[in-house]
């Protein structure tokens, strides 16, 4: 098994202890609930858009340090970027996690989220690291389908 | 005297090293490890006697049928039942689904089904589905803060009454280790003409079980927690009840006569065993039961109690550790707990780096965790092959976990890592 310190890097523990953008805020356009059935991690996530840009992401979550810290680092990246930019970020993050440690992230693009590269060596924890990211994807999809209906 | 540590040699997996340390397997409530005798019996069957059962009339077919039916006899004897009352299924979940489908066939709006908040999801979801299909109402026994079923409260509320058609209750919790008062609940339910089912997934591997003494009409359990292989479970039912129940799955070998208009069905237990059965798995389960019976289930229970008492005592010395359910016997060998406010997944991960295998999460019992006011827990569960040293390693790893997540022994529980 890979070394524990590869998984629990200081950046992760820091995010876990002091989560960024935590709490549920008003106003918001859509609220989604995410769950990781294998361990029971749960998240409620709110999204506020401004045009094509993510204006705010707020959340309340119960879960392990990996899922909590990953959600925290995700909000740092997501707030302020466009829907397409976030889609690219998620795709790269997911690819890295599923890459069994063979794929590295660009630190300039991913900031603190590069700390989750260690998770890729712990397949059982990949879902934990994806929970917040996948929930924001769901929120964006739900906004998209709503705007399609309205048009 | 049984030499419990010598018996570990029968379980080759226990010599594995995990993360450079000897494996400490404390996840037997999840699935038990297999003695060599089980694997050998399955190999011997598959390599020398394999054929389909009942339908193949050649010599191998007769041998395979005999092996399968003899496994049924072994299971029946193990729980004090007749072979014709023992149905082989895929697992305990399928046993419970079978019961919910067949017993529930005549259910209608106004009828009631009673379960408890302490149930495993396998004894919740089939009844939720049944109630959605039939319009029947699902009602729940509550538990107290120790996870004990609140029988008095239920009596005051008239939880079981003349509308109650089915009561399905765990015989032993997979989280708190609490044994339900199955006898009393069964007597109460029978007074109102209801059928009573027990989920024995945890009790049957833990204690000697006699279905007559248990007082229920049906009992579900699984093979892989009984030292047997995966892919085989058991539903026991009173023969006259089974004889009245419609089939669950349709297919080969569960019929009497098939015409294009309709089919008539075989008698129990074959009525409930459609298609080719898990034959080698039945042989493996019988070998697992024979292994347990050679020791004696009373001895097994005594040993599990010893280990559980030792674990409860040692865990009480770990700062910030809260045990779910009773912190003393009597209780089963599944010991769930929280450690400060370190998430169970994180605890599990650190323990794994010490070679200690435990389960972290809600253990398929989310309503019970909610009732106890927590999201998830860590669970260490005992098998007859565990030792006191295993528990000592667990405790050592838990102390290391506190250190890893920087929870000091003097910290107030509320100031653990999450809020630190």
Image (tube, grey):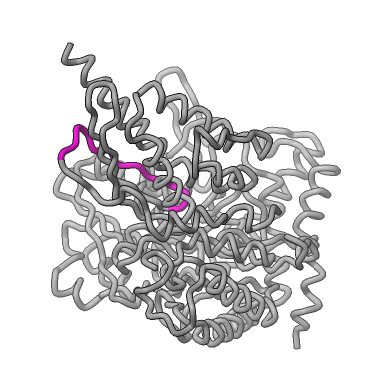
Instruction: Tell me residue B253's x, y (percent).
Output: 57, 35
Q: Residue at x 26, y 51 (%)?
A: A23
Relative vertical location of residue A81 with respect to residue B38 in this rendering, above or below: above
Is residue B173 among what the camera can see?
no
Instruction: Tell me residue B281's x, y (percent).
Output: 68, 48
Report the side of A18 relative to A113 (left or right). left
In the picture as drawn, the residue positioned furthest to the right comes out as B48
For the C terminus of chain B, the quadrant is: bottom left
- The stretch in magenta equals A27-39
Between B127 and B337, the residue placed more toward the observer is: B337
Q: Residue at x 62, y 74 (%)?
A: B394
Relative vertical location of residue A122 with respect to residue B297 in this rendering, above or below: above
* A34 in magenta: yes
* B166 in magenta: no
Instruction: Tell me residue B272's x, y (percent).
Output: 49, 43
Is residue B347 among what the camera can see?
yes
Rendered image quadrant of residue B356: bottom right
Between B97 and B333, the residue placed more toward the observer is: B333
Rendered image quadrant of residue A55: top left
Q: Residue at x 19, y 75 (%)?
A: B153
Instruction: Tell me residue B54's x, y (percent).
Output: 66, 38
In the picture as drawn, the residue positioned furthest to the top comes out as A151
Q: Residue at x 35, y 50 (%)?
A: A20
Report the side of B143 relative to A68 (left or right). left
């Amino acid at each position: 098994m890979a070394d524990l310190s590869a998984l629990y890097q200081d950046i992760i523990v820091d995010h876990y202890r002091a989560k960024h953008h935590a709490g549920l805020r008003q106003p918001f356009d859509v609220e989604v609930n995410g769950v990781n059935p294998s361990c029971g991690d749960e998240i409620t996530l709110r999204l506020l858009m401004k045009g094509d840009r993510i204006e705010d992401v707020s959340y309340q979550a119960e879960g392990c340090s990996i899922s909590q810290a990953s959600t925290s680092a995700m909000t740092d990246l997501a707030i302020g970027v466009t829907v397409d930019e976030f889609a690219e970020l998620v795709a790269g993050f997911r690819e890295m996690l599923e890459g069994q440690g063979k794929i590295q992230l660009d630190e300039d693009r991913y900031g603190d989220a590069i700390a989750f590269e260690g998770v890729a060596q712990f397949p059982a924890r990949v879902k934990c690291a994806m929970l917040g990211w996948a929930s924001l994807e769901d929120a964006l999809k739900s906004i998209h389908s709503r705007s399609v209906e309205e048009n | 005297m049984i030499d419990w540590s010598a018996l570990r040699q029968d379980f080759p997996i226990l010599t594995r090293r995990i993360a450079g340390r000897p494996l400490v397997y404390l996840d037997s409530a999840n699935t038990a490890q297999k003695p060599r005798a089980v694997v050998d019996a399955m190999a011997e069957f598959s390599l020398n006697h394999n054929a389909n059962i009942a339908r193949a009339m050649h010599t191998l077919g007769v041998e395979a049928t005999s092996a399968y039916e003899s496994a049924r006899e072994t299971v029946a004897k193990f729980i004090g039942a007749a072979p014709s009352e023992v149905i082989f299924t895929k697992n305990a979940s399928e046993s419970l689904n079978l019961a919910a489908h067949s017993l529930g066939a005549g259910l209608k709006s106004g009828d009631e089904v009673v379960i408890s908040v302490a149930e495993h999801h396998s004894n919740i979801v089939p009844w939720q589905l049944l109630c959605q299909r039939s319009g029947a109402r699902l009602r729940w026994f509550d538990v107290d803060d120790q996870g004990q079923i609140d029988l008095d409260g239920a009596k005051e509320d008239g939880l079981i009454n003349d509308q109650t058609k089915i009561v399905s209750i765990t015989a032993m919790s997979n989280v708190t280790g609490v044994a339900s008062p199955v006898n009393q609940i069964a007597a109460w339910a029978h007074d109102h003409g209801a059928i009573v089912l027990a989920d024995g997934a945890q009790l049957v591997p833990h204690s000697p079980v006699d279905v007559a003494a248990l007082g229920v009409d049906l009992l579900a359990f699984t093979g892989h927690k009984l030292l047997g292989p995966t892919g085989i479970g058991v539903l026991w039912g009173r023969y006259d009840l089974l004889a009245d129940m419609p089939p669950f799955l349709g297919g080969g070998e569960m019929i009497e006569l098939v015409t294009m208009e309709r089919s008539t069905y075989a008698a129990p237990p074959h009525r409930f065993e459609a298609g080719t059965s898990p034959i080698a798995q039945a042989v493996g389960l019988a070998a697992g039961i024979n292994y347990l019976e050679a020791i004696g289930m009373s001895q097994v229970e005594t040993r599990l109690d010893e280990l559980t008492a030792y674990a409860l005592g040692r865990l009480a010395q770990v700062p910030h550790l809260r045990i779910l359910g009773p912190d003393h016997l009597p209780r089963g060998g599944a010991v769930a707990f929280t450690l400060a406010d370190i998430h169970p997944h994180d605890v599990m991960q650190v323990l794994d780096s010490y070679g200690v295998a435990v389960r972290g999460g809600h253990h398929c019992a989310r309503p019970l965790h909610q009732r106890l006011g927590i999201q998830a827990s860590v669970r260490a569960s005992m098998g007859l092959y565990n030792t006191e040293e295993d528990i000592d390693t667990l405790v050592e790893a838990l102390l290391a976990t506190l250190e890893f997540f920087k929870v000091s022994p003097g910290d107030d529980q509320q100031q653990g890592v999450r809020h630190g």
